Image: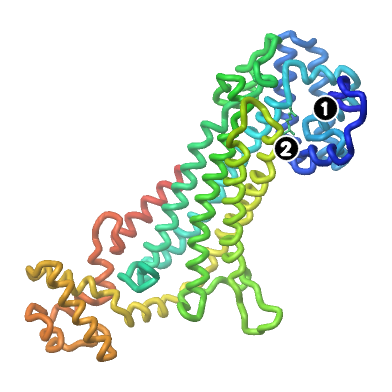
Amino acid sequence: MKLWGGRFTKATDKLVEEYTASIGFDQQLWKEDITGSLAHVAMLGKCGIIGEDEAATIAEGLKKVAAMIEAGEAEFTVENEDVHMNVEKMLIEQIGPVGGKLHTGRSRNDQVATDMHLYLRARVVEIVDLIVKVQESLLEQAKANIDTILPGYTHLQRAQPVLFAHHLMAYYSMLQRDAERLMDSWKRINVLPLGAGALAGTTFPIDREYVAELLKFDAVYTNSMDAVSDRDFIVEFLANASLLMMHLSRLCEELILWMSDEFNFVELDDAFCTGSSIMPQKKNPDVAELVRGKTGRVYGSLIGMLTVLKGLPLAYNKDMQEDKEGMFDTVATLHGALSLFAPMIRTMKVKKENMRQAVAHDFSNATDLADYLVGKGMPFRQAHEVVGRSVLYCIEQGKYLLDMSLDEFRQFSEQFEEDIYEALNPVNVVNARNVLGGTAKNQVEIQIAAAEVQLKQT
Ligand code: ARG
């Protein structure tokens, strides 16, 4: 017998039952569902909408149902469609017809929205904590590599040398924005829809603020139609998750490149790599590849959710049941990626000497040669031209800038003097970028110190 069976004269088609049921995935919400119901029933009792004794009986029953589910003794069925009706059915089985009073003044529409808000607000806190752990691992590696110089790239061509610490701190900053976005979304997640009823509110003298207080929501939705139709908070979460995954994916791409023989800048720990079934020599950065790959499904969930909502009339439509799987999948994907990322970064071996060698064999100090001439009064555009010709000369001669004799330098400009060798030294090249946010060691130390303070506050 369906909870809504009264109006029907025949049983639901089996395929329809399976097609429309959400219990297969929304059973994950059982705790939130019972938490919400406990607050609702306490309010019904307090407001005299049902007897205080009835409210107490229902609350006891709900706790029994929770214990049964927790113990794995409860059976969720497709016949009961979703987590809300499964729980209500179990409650009525436990305490009899009085259990049927729980749904007074409530609809599944405001109930499911409440469950989702409760669910996501807890997950956001967990995810921010996991982000912080990744940030800490980046910070740790940054501190260990405050003197490690590697080529910085633009167009994936050697550009200017940077500190590896600086490179890592760039990712720290991206993750900081991700954490801040998630924390900011809290104020939109932590709003209570319950009390909106099916769409129009309810005829019972409920106390929404009391429910909000019990459930620790900061506010209640001020419009009942908005309350049951709003899934912005899920879209926002998926968008925040997409940005976060995009950042992790970019770092993954770099780790994968750096671990190739062509770069040979880092080695990820054995515990975070896998081998090949045929090629005995292989050590593959699978975790990094998979995080990069899984970024796609998170974007997919975002686009899926936006597309589900586009063109939906107010208020609740069954389409909205499609809000769950993408969200659950995204939460699981973030948990997986972030949990692995922190130890993977922390155990990463940095091949400092290879990075140093790379910088010693490139033209990433060419800008500094031009800046040197500018320092002697030459207009930058002219200096650029002079250095361009010097680089071309070196390429033809099979040498780098620092291999040139002073006489060779002077063929290109009379302004060059002995101090040019100091100016071109990679350590000096890095430290010359002593501007706020630059790669000079003392600037990176400032970034690191600020990050340490910031992490303590997050
Ligand atoms: N399982 C439904 C969902 O996830 C719950 C709300 C159902 N409401 C309704 N009027 N059919 O969206």
Q: Amino acid at mark 2?
A: Leu
Q: Nearer the viewer, residue 80 or 90?
A: 80
Q: Secondary structure at mark 1?
A: helix
Q: Position of residue 328 (x, y in %)?
A: 67, 45
Residue 88 has which mark? 1
Given residues 64 and 278, the one toward you in this image is 278
Q: Quadrant of ligand 1?
A: top right
> Who's the residue at 44% across and 52% down the image?
174
Dot 2 corresponds to which residue? 29
Q: Quadrant of residue 149?
A: bottom left
Given the image, on which type of amino acid does mark 1 rest?
Glu
Q: Position of residue 357 (x, y in %)?
A: 37, 81
The numbered mark, 1 or 2, whose residue comes first in the sequence reads: 2
Residue 20 visible to an observer of this rendering: yes
- The residue located at (51%, 55%) in the rendering is 246
**Disc 1 packing (10 Å; few <14; some 14–19; many ≥20):** many
- For ligand 1, tell me if the residue under mark 1 lies within 8 Å: no
**Quadrant hosting residue 402:** bottom left
